[in-house]
Image (cartoon, grey):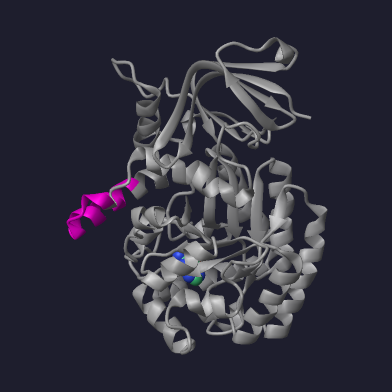
């Protein structure tokens, strides 16, 4: 098992407004789990492997709660449309290419390489409707040492012929894919109805049955764009709000498996109530929401209401796979929201963004995202020496500077459950 001592300057979130800081200290990881942080190495851990990162800033691993690996090749282009035409004109065509295993291997290879370079240690990922290429992708992730949830996507209506399965095929291929996933340890399956408009009531009912029988988690999209919200209300006339449409099919939490919904920009009070009651996670995707002119999610309001929130990169609507860049975007978007609404309360601080990206999203994976005793030994070591300056910074300032000015070149080392993967 992984027994380690790491030396450096540690920062982690205790809560959304409480930052724990331990400079020039020693983090003990025993059997892959955090044992504690000490000013000196306690004698009982003296035999553990020692990794000296003196002067470097060390945080829990960053968690990406929502991204699309099959859209990796179209990030940074075609960003001038809103959600529904963007999906219909560009995204569905690109994802249909993943029927080809060779194309899939190439793109998923690039995606996995970049994820390894980044500060992300865990991610929740959409693949495409194609089970075989999805399994090939899961093979790659398993070898990388990252810990991820991956979803074979389900779509059986309102989708082009070239990216649509029959209901029966979608259910059958999902069940077969889940069986094949038992081969993996670190790469776990997640049920993935794309979003309400692309799944028939019969398909949602079948996925809900699997969710209930297996306790597998669920990922989807919720209230991203106003035209989408209006469409869902047309499609599901007995749901008063978007989340009620998922809830009606048992796909909105309150059962065994966890649920994460991306975006949650345009929420009604009933949606917030259901998110809270059913402990559904919100993946806040600020870059994506700005690029597709979707809006800005009311993150402070959600945190205050006790809703669980993390950060999602949402590639390709988000142009960057970097969670730290999305932390910066979350702060900046919240400032515009507060400015236009005339309410300072909406502003997110760097401390709050860090919480979302570590402990907030980490909870989706269990005890992840903190250096409190018993948490998984997921660690990122940042070298910020190259961010030249004539002065010295506090650990909180160094973290903020990494959000605003850092790149992957600052990610010096990375551990998942105590195992060094970079
Ligand atoms: N809603 C349904 N599918 C998608 C997608 O691929 N990206 C985004 N941003 N929203 C979606
Ligand atoms: Fe998405």
Figure quadrant of the C terminus: top right
Q: Is residue 35 visible?
A: yes
The image shows residue 290 at horizontal and vertical percentages of: 33, 59
Q: Quadrant of the N terminus?
A: top right
Magenta region, mostly helix, strand or loop? helix
Q: Is residue 51 left or right of residue 174?
A: left
x 54%, y 34%: residue: 60
What is the span of residues highlighted in magenta in the rendered image? 331-345
Describe residue 30's horizontal placement relative to residue 277 as left or right. Answer: right
Q: Is residue 140 above or below residue 403?
A: below
Q: Nearer the viewer, residue 158 or 351?
A: 351
Residue 342 highlighted magenta (yes or no): yes
Q: Identify the residue at image location x=32%, y=64%.
A: 295
As displayed, is residue 260 above or below residue 87? Answer: above
Residue 110 seen: no
For the image, the number of numbered tags is 0
Residue 13, image x, y percentages: 47, 36
In-front residue for pair 320/326: 326
Residue 326 picture location, percent across and down: 41, 47
The magenta stretch spans residue 332: yes
Q: Which of 38 and 75 lies nearest the eye of the viewer?
A: 38
Q: Quadrant of residue 203?
A: bottom right
In the rendered view, would you say 366 is above or below 230?
above
Residue 309 screen position, x and y as percent: 47, 53
Residue 287 position by quadrant: bottom left
At x 77%, y 48%, the residue is 185
């Amino acid at each position: 098992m992984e027994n380690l001592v790491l030396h450096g300057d540690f920062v982690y979130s205790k809560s959304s407004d409480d930052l724990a800081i331990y400079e020039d200290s020693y983090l003990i990881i025993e059997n892959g789990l955090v044992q504690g942080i000490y000013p000196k190495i306690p004698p009982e851990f003296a035999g553990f492997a020692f990794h000296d990162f003196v002067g470097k800033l060390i945080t829990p691993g960053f968690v990406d709660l929502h991204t699309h690996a099959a859209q990796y090749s179209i990030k940074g282009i075609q960003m001038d449309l809103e959600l529904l035409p963007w999906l219909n004109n560009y995204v569905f065509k690109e994802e249909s290419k993943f029927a080809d295993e060779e194309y899939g291997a190439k793109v998923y290879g690039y995606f996995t390489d970049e994820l390894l370079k980044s500060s992300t240690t865990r991610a929740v990922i959409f693949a495409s409707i194609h089970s075989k290429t999805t399994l090939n992708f899961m093979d790659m992730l398993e070898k990388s040492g990252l810990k991820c949830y991956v979803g074979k996507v389900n779509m059986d209506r309102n989708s082009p012929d070239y990216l649509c399965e029959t209901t029966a095929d979608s259910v059958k291929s999902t069940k077969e894919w889940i069986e094949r996933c038992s081969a993996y340890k670190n790469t776990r399956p997640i049920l993935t109805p794309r979003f309400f408009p692309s799944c028939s009531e019969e398909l949602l009912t079948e996925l809900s049955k699997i969710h209930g029988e297996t306790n597998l988690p669920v990922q989807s999209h919720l209230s991203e764009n106003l035209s989408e919200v209006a469409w869902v209300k047309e499609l599901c006339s007995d749901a008063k709000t978007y989340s009620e449409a998922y809830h009606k099919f048992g796909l909105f939490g309150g059962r065994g498996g966890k649920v994460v919904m991306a975006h949650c920009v345009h929420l009604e009070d009933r949606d917030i109530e259901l998110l809270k009651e059913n402990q559904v996670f919100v993946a806040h995707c600020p870059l994506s929401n700005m690029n597709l002119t979707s809006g800005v999610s009311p993150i402070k309001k959600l945190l205050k209401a006790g809703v669980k929130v993390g950060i999602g990169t949402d590639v390709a609507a988000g142009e960057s796979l970097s969670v730290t860049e999305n932390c910066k975007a979350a702060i900046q978007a919240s400032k515009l929201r507060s400015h236009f609404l005339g309410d300072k309360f909406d502003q997110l601080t760097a401390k709050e963004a860090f919480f979302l990206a570590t402990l907030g999203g980490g909870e989706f994976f269990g005890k992840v995202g903190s250096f409190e005793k018993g948490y998984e030994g997921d660690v990122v070591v940042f070298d910020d020496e190259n961010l030249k300056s004539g002065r010295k910074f506090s650990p909180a300032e160094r973290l903020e500077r990494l959000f605003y000015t850092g790149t992957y070149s600052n990610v010096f080392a990375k551990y998942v459950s105590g195992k060094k993967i970079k």
